[in-house]
Image (spheres, rainbow, N blue to C red):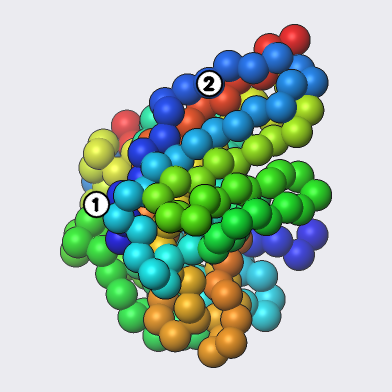
Amino acid sequence: DTGVSQDPRHKITKRGQNVTFRCDPISEHNRLYWYRQTLGQGPEFLTYFQNEAQLEKSRLLSDRFSAERPKGSFSTLEIQRTEQGDSAMYLCASSLAGLAAKETQYFGPGTRLLVL
Amino acid sequence: LAKTTQPISMDSYEGQEVNITCSHNNIATNDYITWYQQFPSQGPRFIIQGYKTKVTNEVASLFIPADRKSSTLSLPRVSLSDTAVYYCLVGPISSGSARQLTFGSGTQLTVLP
């Protein structure tokens, strides 16, 4: 399967704990996006990488959230001191951006986080 | 980013054609229209994208009138497995700058036997 993959698919944690999620994009894709989705709502943008550079962060992304994409391939999203309000589906998407190309984002299956 | 308006839900029966209309009155000249499908506990799946007139692929058609203030996703002969949430998104897709997708609440399509 050459699509976007995410790990783990499910995570249950206690309030105050740190969690880390991983996203592996489609191999030749240079852009990687993180979104968060709560029940009954569409996904909301969190942050985005062009290769290894994090170029944009949403105001939704509090200081407890940090994302990395160290070699321009896989990315990690860490949430420190989790709160119950962090419970959501965390989605990763990747795309191939080029000067002449129309960009289409392809999503992974998501990581569902439950904070108790 | 242009705001979109879609019906909250729609019901259909197997084998019927389903048309989901999206309003986007403030669409800009360089905006494209993109539709995604999402099943429960899965990420959104790209369905179709267009700028004007009609686009067709193996799963759907997208109709866009001349004024581009609305668009209609057409699913031919739906089956039970087409039950999902469908999102209409509008925004520029030139690759010069990143595009954060702005999803609304989508349309819950339920296909009945």
Q: Nearer the viewer, residue A92 or B94?
A: B94
Q: Amino acid at mark 1?
A: Arg
Report the disc number at residue B10.
2
Q: Nearer the viewer, residue B81 or B67?
A: B67
Instruction: Spot the residue most to the bottom.
Output: A99
User: Which residue is located at x 57 percent, y 75 percent?
Assistant: A102
Query: Residue B62's x, y, as percent?
Result: 62, 48
Query: Residue A71's x, y, as percent?
Result: 53, 86
Q: Amino acid at mark 2?
A: Met
Q: Residues within 10 Å of mark 2 (few under 14, many from 20)?
A: some
Q: How many marks?
A: 2
Subunit bearing disc 1: A
Query: Residue A10's x, y, as percent?
Result: 53, 41
Q: Is residue B106 left or right of residue A66?
A: right
User: Which residue is located at x 26 percent, y 64 percent?
Assistant: A58
Report the disc number at residue A45.
none
User: Which residue is located at x 71 percent, y 44 percent?
Assistant: B60
**For mark 1, what is the residue?**
A81
